[in-house]
Image (cartoon, rainbow, N blue to C red):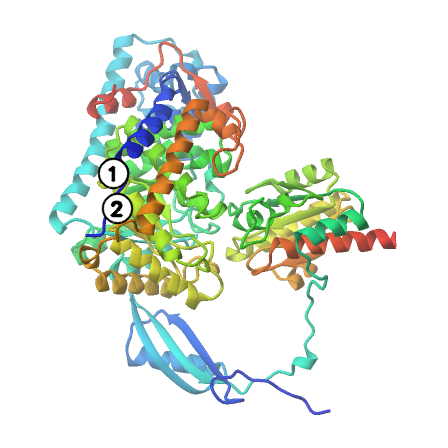
Amino acid sequence: MKKELIRPYGDTLNDGKIQFSFSLPIGPGEIGKEAARIILKQLGLEDIEICGMRDLKGGFTQFIAYASTSAGVDPAEIKVKTVDTPVMDMEATDEFIASHLGREITVVGACIESDAHTVGIDAIMNMKGYNHRYGLERYQYINAINLGAQVASEDLLRRARDEKADAILVSQVVTQKNIHIKNLTKLIELAEAEGLRSQMLFICGGPRISHELAIELGYDAGFGTGSYSTDVASYIAITLAGQRAKA
Amino acid sequence: MLKLNLHPQTVERARKAAKGIAGSFDWLFRDYSSLTIERSIVRLMGIDGADADGRPLPNLVVDHLAAKNLLSRGAAFAIANAMVNTGSTAQEVAEQVADGKLDLSTLQPASEDAVAAVLDQISDQALAQIREQREFRESQFALYGPRRQPAIYVIVATGNIYEDVKQAKAAALEGADIIAVIRSTAQSLLDYVPFGATTVGFGGTYATQENFRIMRAALDEVSASEKRYISLTNYASGLCMPEIAVMGAIERLDLMLNDAMYGILFRDINPKRTLLDQYFARMVNAYAGIEIQTGEDNYLTTSDAIEKAYTVTASQLLNEQFALVSGIKPEKMGLGHAFEINPEVENNFSLELAHAMLTKALFPNSPVKYMPPTKFASGNIFQTHLMNAMFNFIGQLTGQGVQLLGMLTEAIHTPHIADRSLAIENAQYVFNSVKDLSTELCLAEGSFINTRANTVLEEATFFLEKVEDEGLFTAMAKGDFADIRRPENGGKGLDGVFRKDEAYLNPFLSKMKTELELS
């Protein structure tokens, strides 16, 4: 079977063109420019053109470059883990919960540990929602409890247990030095230790979180940039209904 | 000339309501103090350092006083009394307390005159030091000329103060006027200020006195070489708000994020604790000549920027009145607002312009602080860079005081060095391009922009009058602000608020009030 490799596209199929922008701790000049070119060469690139050089002062320079790669990939061989449940709007999700579960479901959410940035959890949970999608608080069949920022993992789990939550939503926005991985791992380990892991869905979200990463960390699902309340609510409703059907 | 026509009676009503609200907390400011206010006093008395476990001496001393029931008279008295009794300096007293060698409850009260003399001398000395820093700053601006308007404000946030220094210097050399060292994400809820230089933080760098000193020295170097005074800012907010204000006053920070209500609404810090702390923190800022900045942008990152535009205006007016109570002059009030309208909304630029002009018109003498798009900044850095240009356009067109530059990578990471440089390039290009454009323009009669600004003002006025009727604490408990319910006795830090007894002393507060001509 013939492989259909695809390559980066500039203006001609298979030209392999890629745009680069990076900085080096060196002043602007021919030596800096050559350093930038060599770094791209070491990456295996060809037709390297350093088209922009910006003095960042203090001994730093930014380089803007174009280059060609011979790397290619066969999309038919790619497997990624994605959240596969269909996405319903708020009304459809409410109706789905009513008919398939016949009760209100409880979702407890928080930005855990050191993370003080509620923008993600708020976009998903707050009444108002984000970009024309109402948040979970607005759903008739969802009891949404948003604990806000800097919530200790222990507190989130305690609340989830008290509320008999169906799902836990964790947001992690700050990712410097992989702090989000540490925080998410801590929560899941505590949940395992307390026997809560199998009691409810564990879902995480944030700009640097993918479904694949979430699965790897032991969560049921992960939602990255571009996810809306509708994605999360549909996933929860359909997954819970599926679990119920199996039980 | 681009100018709004606001209804003057509405402006007056809005200010009157805000003044009524801010003026109703005399009882709190007069009768109460907090752990962090006492620690601020301890710091002003010259006590600094930490024990082997990293616990700051100001905390050890104040916790000792609390444990021995000595706090209601104030830390100033207890320490001065120990100084009279033992002949030690304040620092030595603190060290002995920290070592467990001195129990302040075992000391006899010295004569009132002796204690008063010690406090008088020690407070004069501390205030003189702060005054010198203020005068030095003023002399620098006199020497090199005033800050540009809008000033170019950029952040550094590597977590490592030494790495921050490199980036801050580069940014200043490229044209930044103000450098903000973003704090580590968890610091607002720490009930102590970490000690010493720090190299690990998350989403930012810890605010410590040593970090302040390191960055100030680095920026002083650049100021001298560039012949342009580079300002430094940090955050006097969270559970240690007044302590950080004191540290900033001593180390000559030039601006401080210092909002009256932000901690309550967005960090769930107790309302009484926050208002009390901001009263003293802002007085320190006023005395030190530090420009405060307020955090109204937060209302728009959590709610819709059109629907809730009035909450920004209402908060600005409240922040203004609370600042006046603490002695801050309008020219030191960086009241905040933000460019956060959904870019898909038709005519969003006109709406943003209306809001920006409203802020400028309401506070013509204040260096109002304009915050960049964040909510609709995405991984598409090219689009974000373009939005930042539109934001910069409004900043120059409306003469904002401080332009907090947006980063093209806002949605991705704390800024890389080139991101910041591109932001400065963007601002300089736009500012220069439209420098005097506003003098060439005026609004059409019955213009949408003018109508919109008046609508927001009316909504804010209505809201403030309702809050004045209900009382601020009731309104917060009901969730009137930012749709977040904050009960008067809820939130963090209430147990750190205590009632002063009649013999309570805070010589710094009394002297600052006198010099700032406050009653």
Location of residue A48 in the rendering, given as x and y in whole percent from the top left corner: 41, 85
Disc nearest the viewer among 2 and 1: 2
| Local secondary structure at mark 1 | helix
Which residue is at the far front? B446
Observer able to see residue B253 = no
Residue drawn at the location 28% of the way across and 32% of the way down: B9
Observer able to see residue A186 = yes
- Looking at the rendered structure, whether the residues under marks 2 and 1 are on a common chain is answered as yes
Q: Amino acid at mark 1?
A: Lys
Location of residue A117 in the rendering, given as x and y in whole percent from the top left corner: 51, 47
Viewed as shown, does residue A64 lie left or right of B401? right
Q: CA distance from mark 2 to mark 1?
A: 23 Å
Residue drawn at the location 27% of the way across and 63% of the way down: B430
Label 1 Cα crowd, 10 Å radius (few <14 / some 14-19 / many 20+): many
Residue B347 position (above or below residue A187) = below
Location of residue A187 in the rendering, given as x and y in whole percent from the top left corner: 66, 47
Going from the N terminus, do you reach mark 2 or mark 1 first? 2
Residue B165 position (above or below residue A1) = above
Q: Amino acid at mark 2?
A: Leu
